[in-house]
Image: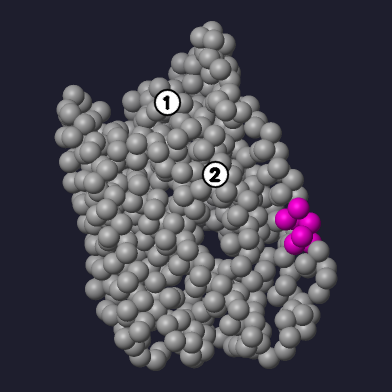
Amino acid sequence: MSEFGGFNWTILATYLGANLYLGFALSKKVETAQDFFLGRRSMPWWAIGISVIATYVSALSFLGGPAWVYSESLAVIAIHLNYPLVIFLVITYFLPFFYNSGVPSIYEYQERRFGPSSRCVMSGIFMVSQALTSAAILYATALVVEFITGVNVNVSILIVGVIALIYTMLGGIAAVIWTDVIQASVLLLGAAIITVALIGELPQPLQETLATLAASGKTTTLDFSLDVTKEATVWSGVIAMTLFHTTVYGANQMMVQRTLAAKSIGDAKKSFLMMGFAAFFIYFLFMFLGVLFYAYYGGREFENGNTIILEFASTYGLPGLMGVLAAAVIAASMSSLDSSLNSLSTVTTVDFYERFLRPSESPEHYLKASRLFTVLWAVAIVLPALLYARSEGSILQTLSQVGSYFVGAKLSMFGLGFFSKHATEKGVLIGVAVGFAVIWLVATETDIAWPWYCLIGGVVNVAVSLAASLVLDGRQAEHSPYTIRGQRRHFEANGLAHQEDGWYKLPGRVDPVSYLLLVFFAATVAALWWFQSWF
């Protein structure tokens, strides 16, 4: 790598300074814990939508997406083909339950539906899995920052972690959302510059390049293989990863909490709809870069595929490009890290501290507690990241598999909560335990690819939970008020309006605009088929 240079440092410092300034500015509007968690429910839907997108597009996606396609083919886009289906399910079934409740923690639903033990289990699963995932993202980002700037990986971990901590602790969810808007802009700017530059540097015109790549199978977009040991097929993307991402977006405090800061149920749904329509284009851009890099470098091997973008930028010679890329990588990381810190603080405060330790304190007291827990979680994330720096790096792959263990448990507990009449707390908790054991066996004793873990875990959890519920507690006389059918009965008995400003508040009712998501999904599949057939 070439010297980072003063101009690049200026770009990076300006970006980091802007995030800190925004945190300080927004801190003046945070007076209570509710302000910290929900931003006074005054956030514009488009900013929330951008924040939702930025949170899931981490540095691993920005750098790892092109690297994955470089070694495989465009068929890996199947993993991200499902977002329209995911958002359709989330805004129809999940979001109304959480938004109507008015609570900052989505896991309070578990207590209302099943009982306090299930709430604690779900909150605990979220905290452990989110902290470990955030630590891995922070570590991976620090490696990239070290590669670009030469700053030691441990120092990079501390710098990124401390800056994200400061503005999140001061400004709460409002700071998370508005800094995510900046971070998404920087990330997409970096990707756009690289795309334009790369197309201009290709040895052949773009169409000829793609025709050449098609001969080697690199432009294959739809792999209909039924082989469950392959990670990226149409079936793993449309079936397994639809369930996976539905849990990520519908049953994940980090994702849902920002939509609870919207002014209305309609704004909350619109923020998710932005993800449903935009995600495909963003991920296709990242994946398409991998194909172009394969043509540019002639398929030569890299010691670390995640550095392909950085290698290109360092030799391209555009002044300030490395500074923009460094800011983009850090932006991708901090947009995930700040969301983790805020949501972990929220769950700790609401589900444990306020629930069990100090139940009757003032809003100001809970604000101080929330900020303290933000600091403690920052430490809890930074420390494992520093430990990863001393490992061989295989922990990242293991962590991805372990993370998928938890998804099946979340999916089954919320799914049973929404639709099952007879599921009870004892049965559900037994199902979760058995599901973990089965997934562990699948992961260690078979070659089944990790995207299928969610489906396998979910099916096992549901079957065992229902069987255990019937054996231990018998058949229930009626649906809980917190099932889909129970909510309909509740709305009708209390004369509640099913809609607000044309958007359904009642869970299970489909908003007309949501059908466009299904049309868009079909259109993307058709477009990928056309792209594959054209070359």
Q: Is residue 90 visible?
A: yes
Residue at 37% in and 57% down: 179
Residue at image location 35% in from the left, 47% down from the top: 174
Dot label at residue 272: 2
At horizontal 65% and vertical 31% (from top left) the residue drawn is: 510
| Residue kind at label 2, given as amino acid type | Phe
| Residue 8 % position (x, y) | 36, 82
The image position of residue 4, as x and y in percent, is 35, 86
- Going from N to C along the chain, the mark reached first, 1 or 2, is 1
Q: Position of residue 97 (x, y in %)?
A: 49, 28
Q: Is residue 115 above or below residue 8?
A: above
Observer-nearest residue: 501 or 212?
501
- Cβ–Cβ below 8 Å for labels 1 and 2? no
- Work out how far the residue at label 1 is from the one at label 2, CA to CA, in angstroms: 18 Å
Q: Nearer the viewer, residue 32 or 222?
A: 32
Q: Is 208 on the left or on the right of 367, as rendered?
A: right
Q: Residues within 10 Å of mark 2 (few under 14, many from 20)?
A: many
Q: What residue is shown with label 1?
A: 101
The quadrant in which residue 193 appears is bottom right
- Magenta residues span 523-529
Quadrant where the N terminus sits is bottom left
What element does badge 2 sit on? helix
Residue depicted at x 60% and y 48% = 276
Give the crowd class for mark 1: few <14, some 14-19, many >=20 residues within 10 Å. few
